[in-house]
Image (cartoon, rainbow, N blue to C red):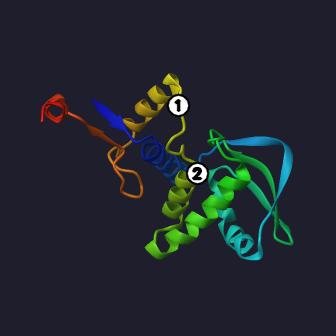
Amino acid sequence: MLVIDQQAAHERILYEHYLDILQSGEYTSQKELFPRTIQLDPVRAEFLKNMLSPLHAVGFELEDFGHNSFILHGTPAGLYEGDSVEVIIDKMIEQYTSNLELQLGVQENMARSLSFSAGIKRGRRLEKEEMQRLTDQLFGCSMPYKSPSGRKCFFILELDELSKRFTS
């Protein structure tokens, strides 16, 4: 029996996806029908200003509007819509700043931050098609075994091991 950690698996998928985009420079962006204004506290706004270039490189169309405000014109195509874009950006800033101590390159830090903030979370019920797509995408990754943070994406429960648990 194959047991997949949906959060770790989706983070791995997104990490490799965003890293490929950052390295190739080829991204697609989904335009917002109506641009949104995002207001941040001064510290987060300063971090976001410093992150604008790599954010543009993955498909965020975001511009500094002054006074700790940003205008969002577009998001990366395929961005998980479980959370609002504002929540994803806030989580991404938090993750990016916590990754600074790891001394990662800008591209790797951005890919990790986006994968953690935009990934499917544990406990979210997936439809059968979503499960199949997640499994297919995971095993299409170059490193499907571990998430960017090192958590296992899946484990295999052997039939012998399962039967031992019921006979002891």
Q: How many marks?
A: 2
Residue 145 coordinates in the image, percent (x, y): 32, 46
Q: Nearer the viewer, residue 102 or 117?
A: 117
Q: Position of residue 57 (x, y in %)?
A: 63, 55
Residue pictured at 77% horizontal, 67% vertical: 40
x, y (%) of residue 140? 39, 36
In the picture, measured across the screen, residue 80 lies left or right of residue 19, that is right
In the image, what residue occupies the spot 53% across and 45% down?
Answer: 121
Q: Decide which of tag 2 and tag 1 comes sooner along the chain.
A: 2
Q: Residue at x 18, y 31 (%)?
A: 166
Q: Would residue 41 be found to the left or right of residue 160 on screen?
A: right
Q: Quadrant of the N terminus?
A: top left
Mark-to-mark CA distance, 2 and 1:
31 Å
**Residue type highlighted by circle 2:** Gly
Q: Give residue 80's quadrant in the image.
A: top right
Q: Which residue is mark 2?
A: 25
The three-letter code of the residue at mark 1 reads Leu
Identify residue for label 1.
126
